[in-house]
Image: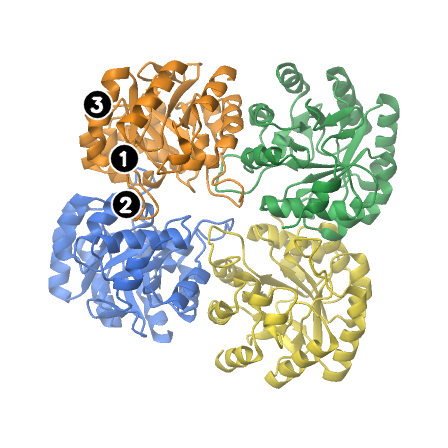
Chain colours: A green, B yellow, C blue, D orange
Amino acid sequence: MDHTLLTQHCSREVRIGREVFGGGEVGWIAGPCAAESYEQMRDAAAALKACGIAVMRGGLYKPRTSPHSFQGLQAGGVDIIRRIKAEFGLAYVSEVVDGASLELLLPYLDAVQVGSRNCMNYALLKLVGRAGKPVILKRGFAMTVDEWLCAAEYLALAGARDIVLCERGIRTVTEVTRFTLDLGALAWLKSQGVLPVIADPSHATGDSSLVVPLARAALAAGADGLMLEVAPCPEQAQCDARQQLSFDQLRALRGTS
Amino acid sequence: MDHTLLTQHCSREVRIGREVFGGGEVGWIAGPCAAESYEQMRDAAAALKACGIAVMRGGLYKPRTSPHSFQGLQAGGVDIIRRIKAEFGLAYVSEVVDGASLELLLPYLDAVQVGSRNCMNYALLKLVGRAGKPVILKRGFAMTVDEWLCAAEYLALAGARDIVLCERGIRTVTEVTRFTLDLGALAWLKSQGVLPVIADPSHATGDSSLVVPLARAALAAGADGLMLEVAPCPEQAQCDARQQLSFDQLRALRGTS
Amino acid sequence: MDHTLLTQHCSREVRIGREVFGGGEVGWIAGPCAAESYEQMRDAAAALKACGIAVMRGGLYKPRTSPHSFQGLQAGGVDIIRRIKAEFGLAYVSEVVDGASLELLLPYLDAVQVGSRNCMNYALLKLVGRAGKPVILKRGFAMTVDEWLCAAEYLALAGARDIVLCERGIRTVTEVTRFTLDLGALAWLKSQGVLPVIADPSHATGDSSLVVPLARAALAAGADGLMLEVAPCPEQAQCDARQQLSFDQLRALRGTS
Amino acid sequence: MDHTLLTQHCSREVRIGREVFGGGEVGWIAGPCAAESYEQMRDAAAALKACGIAVMRGGLYKPRTSPHSFQGLQAGGVDIIRRIKAEFGLAYVSEVVDGASLELLLPYLDAVQVGSRNCMNYALLKLVGRAGKPVILKRGFAMTVDEWLCAAEYLALAGARDIVLCERGIRTVTEVTRFTLDLGALAWLKSQGVLPVIADPSHATGDSSLVVPLARAALAAGADGLMLEVAPCPEQAQCDARQQLSFDQLRALRGTS
């Protein structure tokens, strides 16, 4: 389909805080799946700083499959993000799920994330595209690459110029990982040279022991960056505990990539 | 996962206008993919009345894969719906995509539809669940049945009591139809007896010549109703032209099901 | 791809014993998943006769996922088949898995079945195509319709003229059934009118309570016949116990289809 | 399921010619998709030697989707293989498709390949398992990892001790590559430590420009080796022309991996 705006107007190199995506170096985004407390985010922020990673994640709005699962701190967590940003000078990326969450988080966001469950929520894409911030657009569970680029085109049509695609795994027959990280699609997108593309091996595998090999594989396939879940005490996390790296695992990965 | 609210509080029989879903008879919903003009909707409404079908569809907000495709008449079409309802006394079902479209359409809606692309847009599900109207919840392209029931549980948690599931096909290896209508999932849901389930063979096949056999198959598998695309001049439709039945095809199907 | 031979030389109506597939009536094939004993096959044969079903199944060579599972009686079961055929006058269909099993079973086969796991085993298709018997060709777990027709074209190129396609479910995201019966593909194939197509709802669902609604759905979608698993004591079967109908269920289905 | 024999009796390190798979170094297998002529195989063999690659591929039996496509030189190509092996001292790996092809090729094979289309052809697995040679077992288009290990268990039960799994891509929603190389499954298998696992990025992508990044990704994910298609004149190949590397591309990949 028609991806003209992406091709003509969007940046091939996107800066979020001091990390650059698409410029030849690897851009890094890391942090807990969900922000759960000041202490948790503080410890994660300190670990990121020590590693030299400049962009933090840690969601406040968590679209969970069950409405009975923890949905994120939401508005109640904004003050934590404000304090962490002030204390550590990190850039912050977080998922938004509607106009209200976008408005509330926007002052603290250095990039806006649209998650897999909302990648075809075109009303949200129009809002996010108008927000004037870089956007990280995750791929849907069963989205073709063309549909993904069309979703990015919605962002571009609404005004976004700095769009980073994030491959986070698709649903397949494979039963030993939660999703299948599609590095062929990533390599193909890189060969087209339209938008920067990063990989999220944490959601793709759902298993921290597989995150490191898949992160390395993504970089070898040409990924412009990584989005990683890392937590001070992964096993205590309220959300996606099994897939979060420890600080030691993150350091080891940084040291060798 | 936990679907307690569906089981404890939701209706097994849902009434939309004079059609009943889940009460043993087949409930029918039909109409154009998108409302495009007063004349088109009037002709469709007359055909529905002549067939004895009491609920009309014809979307004003169309979530299209490409932002460059026709997106529906949106607010500009509300007056058409108001007139058609007044003139023909039909109930009306339409997809909403955000809070604004819900608010605008709500006075004219007898049931609110959540589409496949928004079936995991939990912010929208919360709004729709509070609206006090029956809800038709389509299945996502790659949603498990458990995820679908969890999405319905979001509606129930927000207050919805009248929820109808709509099987509209999932993405598979098959290349001769757009999607694969999953009548096994439909039959399984019927065997659980939690919510009424209808089928949309128009989107599932993308081909009007296959809609009739699949509609019959859905009813034979136990579907509580059908949602069908039908248009005065299918070949001129701005959206999904190939999958819309002619009035003659609809009449033939009604006569034999 | 090229399916010329199917189109030019194959029968649109295939006779196996006294059942006809593709002639407007429904052809029936039923019996145990695997032949396990003379008594079991005798009881099944008597039930089939009582129902008026003229073709029996009951495999001797069972391609099981694990090599540690029961693999069928193999050569040791041939005498059972010989006796049952002589006593009840039923036609017999069974899967073959290589040249040796084909040669051994051929004298007793009224149609040769190629199973899903061997549907791209072209060496086997060539042998089966030369055998001079009707062939039932099951669809593979993840086969496109074009690939399926190409597999049938292998049979035709080797000499087969009487080929019946059997839709038995494909692998999808759905978790409440073993496979997803693809009635859209079946309806599409019927619309092309090349070969007779039957459905196997037993393997598709893996659950006897869903076999009856899916069997009815397949017929409503235009299936030329059904292949059903039925057993005297389904719960004691060594293979696929949960999906086999009881005789009562089979009678009920016959009476209403 | 039960994979006891793999775990207890199979080698974690498999030697084919002078390449070792599972010993920490990368094992390499390369060559044309299909052997087509003495000259083609001679040029490929010379290029492999120059690169230091010790195992050659180049199939004589090609299971093609259409029976009207080139099926390989079959028995007519055996003499080419004999000459090439004698002249260049390379090991040779080739797919077999039945007992006859196995018997014919066995004297020239250093490892027997079972292809994706035959990965659930258990009759063939039993024959191959008895042949006394290392086996390369490709994954099926829609095979779970458990089913793959069960297929390997068939080989082990028949006597095979040296089994190498080959991940070659699975069928998914992705449309920009032929298949999706599943490096998550590969990394998971490596974490279990049962059998060596290699990757075939040529079949996975179907596009030679994507083979190099995916080959590097596979090694980064922990692959024990690579199977690559390479041809003197890729564009003239009768089979899978688009996915074969040129010698220059192969040399570049060798130099940097």
The residue that label 3 is drawn on is: D82
Picture coordinates of residue C160, whole percent (x, y): 22, 57
The residue that label 2 is drawn on is: C122
The residue that label 1 is drawn on is: D125
Tell me what residue is drawn at x 32 percent, y 59 percent: C165
**Chain identity of mark 2:** C
The Cα atoms of the two marked residues, 2 and 1, are separated by 15 Å
Give the crowd class for mark 1: few <14, some 14-19, many >=20 residues within 10 Å: many
Given the current orientation, which residue lies at the most extreme bottom position? Answer: B50
Give whichever of A37, D148 is nearer the camera.
D148
The Cα atoms of the two marked residues, 3 and 1, are separated by 25 Å
Give the crowd class for mark 2: few <14, some 14-19, many >=20 residues within 10 Å: many
Q: Along the horizontal axis of the image, is C69 left or right of A220?
A: left
The Cα atoms of the two marked residues, 2 and 3, are separated by 26 Å
Picture coordinates of residue D121, whole percent (x, y): 29, 41
**Mark 2 and mark 3 on one chain:** no
Q: Which amino acid does label 2 sit on?
A: Tyr
